[in-house]
Amino acid sequence: MRRLQLAHVQVDRLTAARTVPDYRPYGRAPRSTTLPAGTYWVSMAQPQKHWVQAMLNEDTYVPFPYFYDVSGWSNPLLAGIPGGSAGRPVSASIERVPLLARPAPPTLPTDLPRVGIIDQRPEPDYQYQTTGWLRWRLARDWRVPFTALSPGEVTADALGKLDVLLVPNVDAGPTYRELGADGRAALAAWVQAGGRFVGWQEATSLAVHLGISSVHLTDPQASSPGALMRVDAPRPNEYVMWDEYYSPVIHPNGAGVVAQFPDSMFVSGYAERADTLAGTPVETVERSGSGSTTLFSVEPNFRAFTDGTARLLFDAMLATPTPLRAAVTPQVAGRGATTVTLPTPAQHVAYEQRGKS
């Protein structure tokens, strides 16, 4: 709401409950709903109506088949905020909301875990986007202290000072090699002894090759430059930003499923064959000795702007997630089986430096 207000959008609030006969919750069919007093109420009858539509629509139509980056930018879906719209004009008892204060950072537990991250390119002149987003989220938004390690700095001594290791979308192949035999053994032993590994996208492949995850990975059949897709998750109203570039399809193969695409997909933005993702996991968890491995098929912190799924990452950072259900897919022969190969070192750089020359 504050973001809308800073763009000169008039934001009101219901002073009394109001029944809306054709209320359409985000991503759902219209229904009659009684909204309680205090509900934010944003009318299209104002000068900034086009900005309201662009920011609050669940799926804004784009009249051309060319996209860069993300094709769906619905702010409530990105933030995991419940809401919806009325199909016809409706009157209500409302009052204007003064400019809201900047949201406070999340409340941290007193026993905050010791957090580390893998930073593949720690030098200041160039960092991977995924690492920069993670650093910003930890330092500026959540205000969580963390220790950054390059793959070569991963040792038994360094890991012994950590409770959880966050591994973003680094190059899996080079990271695996730069860890070296000692680093790989130390990381696997650390998880067995109680450490918690949390990784996403290419880090899923890294975890499989390290032997700390049994999930099976395949390349997606769906295609999208970036679309918002609803997921079933411990927190309601969650939508992930899905793109085809780094997002494998996870087959649990014994891992518990924490979040998954529903059988009936809802997509905001442009995507082809999104139905092929239906029922597949977005987040998995499995125990390894006294520790655990939590994996995301997507970037939960895309541009440090997907506040909804970043909360799933926040929860996984604080504690091992509880699965929604146990895996029901058949076991794949051999722990760590995967059809996704470790990428070449140039893939991230080539993708992220497009157009910079």
Image (cartoon, rainbow, N blue to C red):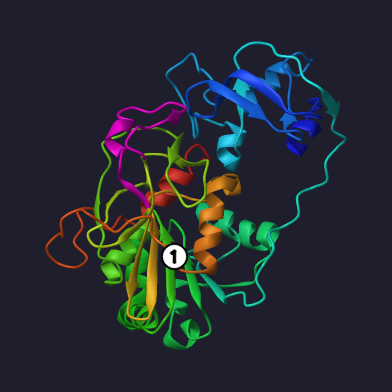
Query: Residue 286 appears at what percent x and percent y?
Result: 33, 67
Is any atom of residue 173 visible in this view?
Answer: no
Rendering coords of residue 261 (x, y %)? 37, 42
Q: Quadrant of the N terminus?
A: top right
| Lateral position of residue 10 relative to residue 112, left or right | right
Seen as rendered, the residue at the extreme left is 333
Q: Looking at the rendering, which quadrant does residue 209 occupy? A: bottom left
Q: Nearer the viewer, residue 229 or 92?
A: 92
- Front-most of 329 and 334? 329
The vertical placement of 236 against 98, above or below, is below
Could you tell whether 204 is left or right of 19 in the image? left
Name the residue carrying label 1: 198
- The residue segment tinted magenta is 262-282
Q: Main secondary structure of the magenta part?
A: loop
Image-quadrant location for residue 21: top right
| Front position in the image: 125 or 215 | 215
Q: Secondary structure at mark 1?
A: strand
Residue at 42%, 70% in the rendered image:
197
Residue 325 seen anywhere in this rendered image of the structure: yes
Q: Is residue 280 above or below residue 257?
A: above
- Name the residue at 81% across, 30% down: 15
